Image: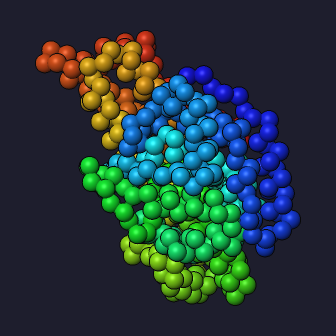
Amino acid sequence: MTEIPSSDTVSPKLERIAKLAKQAPEMAFTSLSHHIDIDWLREAYRRTRKDGATGVDGQSADEFAANLEENLKSLLDRAKSGTYRAPPVRRVHIPKGDGTKTRPIGIPTFEDKVLQRAVAMVLGAVYEQDFLDCSYGFRPGRSAHDALENLQHQLVCMAGGWVLEVDVKAYFDTVVHEHLREMLHRRVRDGVLLRLIGKWLNAGVMENGSLSYPDAGTPQGGVISPLLANIYLHEVMDMWFERDIKPRLRGRACLVRYADDAVMAFSQEDDARRVLDVLSKRVGKYGLSLHPDKTRLVKFRRPDRLLPSDGGDTGQPGSFDLLGFTHYWAMSRKRKWVVKRKTAKDRLSRALKQIGAWCRMHRHWSVKSQWEILVKKLRGHYEYFGIIGNSSAIHRFREVAKNLWHKWLSRRSQRARMPWWKMDELLKRYPLPPALLSRRHRLIA
């Protein structure tokens, strides 16, 4: 597939939209869709992943690209004239948490992904000027590691305190369409864009040959869904916390949110408990609910600041999870209390289960082919979990992955059992990558 170059006309348009949105934060845009022309769609196509799963029509990125210009022109004509029909998303389920539960993912058609990307580019230029610094998920120039480092810094500065883990139950499935439309209408009143978003919200879900039309939610997996989710929680949580909550608190507080994963930290216990008491009512106003087991208040005061009311000399600060990491207090090499992070148990267990399942399914491949894929999987794991202070967890991941590979190589046939001396010889020829910090954290270290 031939990749098309980046358009020189799109970036100036995005800059103009962003500049106007920043200068007029209260203004509602009535005309945005005229920016979406054939060059804009080419850029949207360039930014769309080409290796993703196919939608209900089975069309791949290669098949779409075979007649690219005609397909883009047809898509543009239908989008602008109002005759575009949003196809249903194909629902699949992927493992969630420790692997015992699954998460529904909606896969749009490739053509739909391109159009969603085009609309998301326009809306993103507007809403990036509105979103607060506490929001990190699916935003340009921001990452999960940025969110984690900011939270770590805030907790150290306030010497810990009380941490409220916020878990919105089935968030992507429960977004109320009416509320979302109202939020969008405050900033965007372009009829073409709003009609397209309405079509995507009502497109339906195809699962096991059965078509259904949920009356709430935005399919997790859609290109535009993360942006719509951020717009919703920007009003429900971010603005509420900054505008209504923080001015009423006695002590310091911060919010860090990555999509629907959020943590609130408070220096004062009574502040934390007051917010916990009203949080359920706040999200309930917008059709959402908190997970009763996963939403919890954690005592996270720095160990040398523990009070008698926290448990006296025997009291210990708790720990909490965010974005795959467990956060806990520990002493640094310089004998200072710091917030450290390690791979959460459920994430480590799930990652190793996936490695084991892959090795079992592909044990009859050539050793070289298996090795090439395993190297990519291990490096991908290191790139996310290879942070300062987490060396033991990524070393353990490598060792268990090596053992799993040996296990399934030994079960290729009844006579294929491989002694460890032979496995060691194989690893000299096909070495697994060492457990190293990610590139980002090697620079920091």
Position of 317 relative to 247 (above/below): above
| Residue at 56 percent of width and 70 percent of height | 180
* Residue 342 sits above or below residue 23 on the image: above
In the foreground, 433 or 5: 5
Residue reaching furthest to the left:
414
Residue 372 found in image quarter: top left
Task: State which quarter of the image contains the N terminus.
Answer: top right
Q: Position of residue 18 (x, y in %)?
A: 80, 56
Q: Is residue 379 visible?
A: no
**Residue nearer the viewer, 325 or 172:** 172
Residue in view at x 73 percent, y 57 percent: 32
Q: Is residue 281 visible?
A: yes
Quarter location, residue 58? top left
Identify which residue, 166 or 12, lies in the foreground: 12
Q: Residue at x 57, y 39 (%)?
A: 74
The colour mode here is rainbow
| Residue 45 on image: x %, y % | 61, 37
Instruction: State left or right for residue 111 relative to residue 72.
Output: left
Looking at the rendered image, the quarter that the C terminus falls into is top right
Is residue 306 shown left or right of residue 378? right
Residue under the image location 80 percent in, 35 percent down: 8
Q: Quadrant of residue 254?
A: bottom right
Q: Please tell me whether residue 70 is drawn above or below residue 86 in the rendered image.
A: above
**Residue 365: x percent and y percent?**
30, 18
Total tally of numbered discs in the picture? 0
- Residue 119 sits above or below residue 171 on the image: above
Residue 207 vs residue 415: left or right?
right
Q: Position of residue 343 (x, y in %)?
A: 48, 49
